[in-house]
Image (cartoon, rainbow, N blue to C red):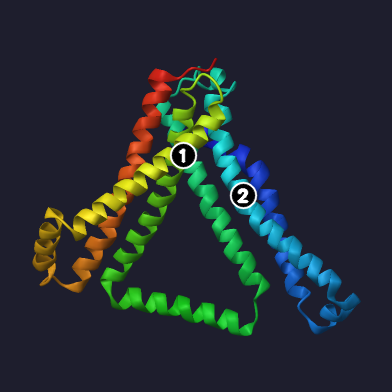
Amino acid sequence: MLKLLKYEWKACARICLPLYGAMLLMSIINALMTTDGAQGFLNGIPSAILAMVFVALLVAVFVVTAVILIQRFYKNLLGDEGYLMFTLPVTVAQHIWSKVIVAVAVCLLSGIIAVLSISILGADTNLIFAIGMVLHQVGTTIAADPNALGYLFESILLLLLSLASGVLYLYLCMALGHLAKKHRVLMSVVWYFVLTTAAQFLLTFVLFGVANGPIETVMTALANALNGMPQQVLLHGVLLGFCVATAIPGAIGYFGTHYILRHKLNLE
């Protein structure tokens, strides 16, 4: 498993890290070009070009991240490389989790780099002071309220589960598309829209049932039961409830993908 993670990370880092470096460098250059002297140089044309390059790199970071997490799974397990990968002494679960873990890490890193680059671009004394105040306030809140650390942990868990569920959802769509004999990439896209539409329909049905039907009575009774609970307990319950709700589609994606890769995989 550790070797799978190592090689998966190296394959992703080979593309992502130079892109991250270019984006950080471009944000620094653009920050330097915000001075009055730089803005007046050649009527501000170089500054405008550099700004467009920065925006292009910002978009490229997220596009490349999405392409990598799709390509690494599809080519590595469903393509020609699958013949070699499935001869390794590792389980199907280890193959899936190694790709999910690295994909989540890359998504997080891409978001952090994007936020950092934008912060550098707009960095000044006021911004730095504001960031310091926010961090100080967060530290003060955690120190004053023991529940705050729990809220923070549950929020981070929710973020990780959301990313993992999204990745596993894409993997399931690709695995289902691979069951077709022809046009497998196209069928993966078709499955994506079919599952998305089905999920939206199910969500609408549930919400409609909550507003009009027996579920309304159950939800009203539950709301009355929770009415006397402390606010801290309710907030923990809401965050943990969101975590469970987010983990359910992720579990469906994982077990569906695992079943197809183990029992229905056809690399021909």
Count of number-bearing discs = 2
Of residues 36 and 138, the one drawn nearer to the viewer in this rendering: 36
User: Does residue 251 appear in the picture of this structure?
Assistant: yes
230 left or right, relative to 83: left
Q: Amino acid at mark 2?
A: Val
**Residue at 40%, 44% in the rendered image:** 197
Front residue of this view, candidates 27 and 42? 42
Q: Position of residue 14 (x, y in %)?
A: 67, 42
Vertical order, 103 against 44 (above or below): above
Say which element carries label 1: helix
Seen from the viewer's position, the closer of residues 206 and 253 is 206
The answer to which quarter of the image holds residue 239 is bottom left
Residue extending farthest to the right is: 42
Residue that appears at 53% across and 51% down: 107
Q: Quadrant of the C terminus?
A: top right
Q: Which of the labelled discs sits on residue 63, or is there none?
A: 2
Disc 1: which residue = 192
Q: Quadrant of residue 222?
A: bottom left
Amino acid under label 1?
Tyr
Q: Position of residue 106 (x, y in %)?
A: 55, 48
Give x and y (percent) for residue 38: 83, 78
Which quarter of the picture shows residue 164? top left
The outermost residue toward the top is 268
Give the mark nearest the N terminus, 2 or 1. 2
- In space, the residues marked 2 and 1 are separated at their CA atoms by 18 Å
